[in-house]
Image: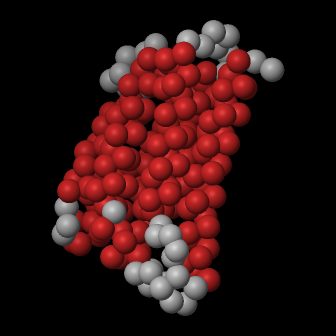
């Protein structure tokens, strides 16, 4: 096994736990009639699942690296670790009888604040691990996403969340699409 495969196993296990957290919360919210759902919360959860898939796909650019330093390993696993924290905070425990709108707004500073920090760490780690200019298109989109996360973390206005969460979803989707494009056309061309 290559060094990347060893590191990828660690990241994949942690990220798999994050995906499981979101899927269990989503399944429980559908299964239990006592749970009152809230569409921005659901779209936020879907956005996180998409971001996790993007990370799993995007990190394969490091497959050919044969040497990994300790700080690079730390940067690499910070994404799955913070992703797990976001997923864990996303749904109340226990979920039975919950109002997801209330939980969403009560924990917005935590989930969106951690997501903003994670996005900034990803921008930094992408630049360090890939040794490329931090001003590539994917990182620029990530900076916009980080600003939206910060806005959502501080805003209590429901209208802001109903507008910005769909925008966030579209930006995460665009970022995921560009991750795939950067593999085909080359990072320098973006």
Asked whether the viewer can see residue 80, the reply is: yes
Position of residue 13 relative to residue 37, above or below, is above
Write down the quadrant of residue 158 in the picture. Answer: bottom left
Along the line of sight, which residue is nearer the eye, 42 or 91? 91
Quadrant of image for the C terminus: top left
Q: Tell which residue pokes out farthest to the top in this image.
A: 67
Q: Is residue 9 left or right of residue 69?
A: right
Coloring applied to the structure? secondary structure
Viewport quadrant of the N terminus: top right
Residue at 30% across / 37% down in the picture? 143
* Residue 110 point in image, percent of width and height: 33, 54
The residue shown at (20%, 67%) is: 156
Q: Is residue 160 left or right of residue 135?
A: left
Residue for point 48% across, 85% down? 97
x%, y% of residue 138? 41, 33
Task: Find residue 87 and report its horizontal and vertical position in percent.
Answer: 50, 56
Horizontally, residue 39 falls left or right of residue 49, namely: left
Given the current orientation, which residue lies at the most extreme front position? 94
Q: Is residue 47 visible?
A: no
Coordinates of residue 112 in the picture (x, y in percent): 33, 53
Taking depth in this image into account, of 180 and 71 the one nearest to the observer is 71
Q: What residue is at 41 percent from the left and 69 percent from the top?
A: 41
Work out which residue is located at the far right of the displayed protein and give it: 1
């Amino acid at each position: 096994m290559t060094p990347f495969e060893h590191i990828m196993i660690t990241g994949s296990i942690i990220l798999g736990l994050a995906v499981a957290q979101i899927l269990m919360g989503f399944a429980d919210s559908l299964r239990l009639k006592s749970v009152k759902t809230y569409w921005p919360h659901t779209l936020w959860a879907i956005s996180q699942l998409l971001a996790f898939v993007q990370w799993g796909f995007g990190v394969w650019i490091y497959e050919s690296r044969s040497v990994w330093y300790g700080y690079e390993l730390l940067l690499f696993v910070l994404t799955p670790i913070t992703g797990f924290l976001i997923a864990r905070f996303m749904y109340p425990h226990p979920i039975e009888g919950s109002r997801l709108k209330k939980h969403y707004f009560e924990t917005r500073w935590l989930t969106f604040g951690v997501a903003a920090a994670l996005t900034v760490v990803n921008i930094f780690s992408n630049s360090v691990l890939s040794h490329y200019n931090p001003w590539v298109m994917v990182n620029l989109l990530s900076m916009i996403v980080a600003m939206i996360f910060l806005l959502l973390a501080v805003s209590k206005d429901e209208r802001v969340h109903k507008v910005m969460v769909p925008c966030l979803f579209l930006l995460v989707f665009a970022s995921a699409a560009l991750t795939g494009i950067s593999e085909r056309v080359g990072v320098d061309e973006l």
